[in-house]
Image: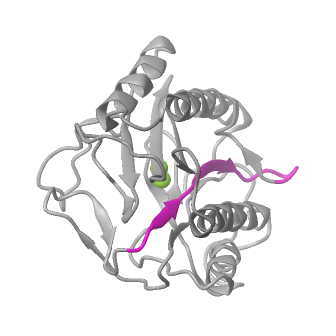
Amino acid sequence: MVKIKTNESLAAMREAGRVVARALAAVRAEAAPGVRLDRLDEVARRVLGGAGAGSPFLDYHPDWAPVPFPAVVCVSVNDAVVHGIPDGSRLAAGDLVSVDCGATLDGWAGDSAVSFVVGRGRPEDERLISTAQDALAAGIGAAVVGNRIGDVAHAIGRVCRAAGYGIPDGFGGHGIGRTMHEDPGVPNEGRPGRGMKLRHGMVLAIEPMLIGGGTDEHYTARDGWTVRTSDGSRAAHVEHTVAITDEGPRVLTVP
Ligand code: MG
Ligand code: MG
């Protein structure tokens, strides 16, 4: 069931989104060659803690996962698409890193992800990341009152496919509110004019995931969480929490 938010609730979600944006900015500033992935988690924890926010990621334990998620951020490096666990491994120059972060503040959740290269990027990685950002912008642009979920999905998928990238099936965005995952699902590919109609007060986490090698195929690593590309190519993942309003889409996960 889709939960429509009041304007007061949207304002509260904006504050949660601000905390997420601050945490991601801090993580990105910390990322450098030689830095351990679990250091990035520490940095995000400090921002959430300082803001009095909780983490919807920490100890999250869906049925399919063998263990609860142990961190407040997912850090997915190179061929990891999503759900990477920030462990003791170290970043290297040229790594393509996707960091996903959530926060819960005053009972409202925010969810956002960024992709970037550590140091100087290969042109193909820069293109993958900028296409992911374009796909996210297209999805946000379609998130307007009167459109349908399929319009958002189609807008995302079109940008990814036109650039020749793969889209991992079975993953996508979601409604968000009191909890991180609410109805409806927001696929990263779909048919325009289909699905639920968008209304003022709906809030969606829109999150394109792109596979650079062009395949849609992926697998879950032995840690039970990390999703990797089957062809070993690099992947990008970007996300914003977006409110649908009569005044147009409002991105909540910005500073
Ligand atoms: Mg996320
Ligand atoms: Mg999400």
| Residue 115 shows in the view | no
Image x and y of residue 142, in percent: 76, 68
Vertical position of residue 94 compared to residue 157: above or below: above
User: Seen in the image, is 179 located left or right of residue 68?
Assistant: right
In the rendered image, residue 193 lying in the magenta stretch gets the answer no
**Mark count:** 0
The residue positioned 76% from the left and 46% from the top of the image is: 250
Image x and y of residue 162, in percent: 68, 85
User: Seen in the image, is 128 located left or right of residue 168?
Assistant: right
| Residue 25 shows in the view | yes
**Residue range of the region highlighted in magenta in the rendering:** 233-248
Q: Which of 62 and 46 is in front in this view?
A: 46
The residue positioned 40% from the left and 60% from the top of the image is: 78
Colouring mode (rainbow / by chain / secondary structure / one colour): one colour
The residue positioned 60% from the left and 55% from the top of the image is: 204
Vertical position of residue 144 compared to residue 112: above or below: below
Image x and y of residue 71, in percent: 29, 36
Q: Nearer the viewer, residue 10 or 223?
A: 223
In the rendered image, residue 235 lying in the magenta stretch gets the answer yes
The residue positioned 69% from the left and 30% from the top of the image is: 255
Q: Which of 186 and 74 is in front in this view?
A: 74
Quadrant in the picture for residue 215:
bottom left
User: Seen in the image, is 192 located left or right of residue 180?
Assistant: right
Image x and y of residue 5, in percent: 64, 43
Vertical position of residue 53 compared to residue 72: above or below: above
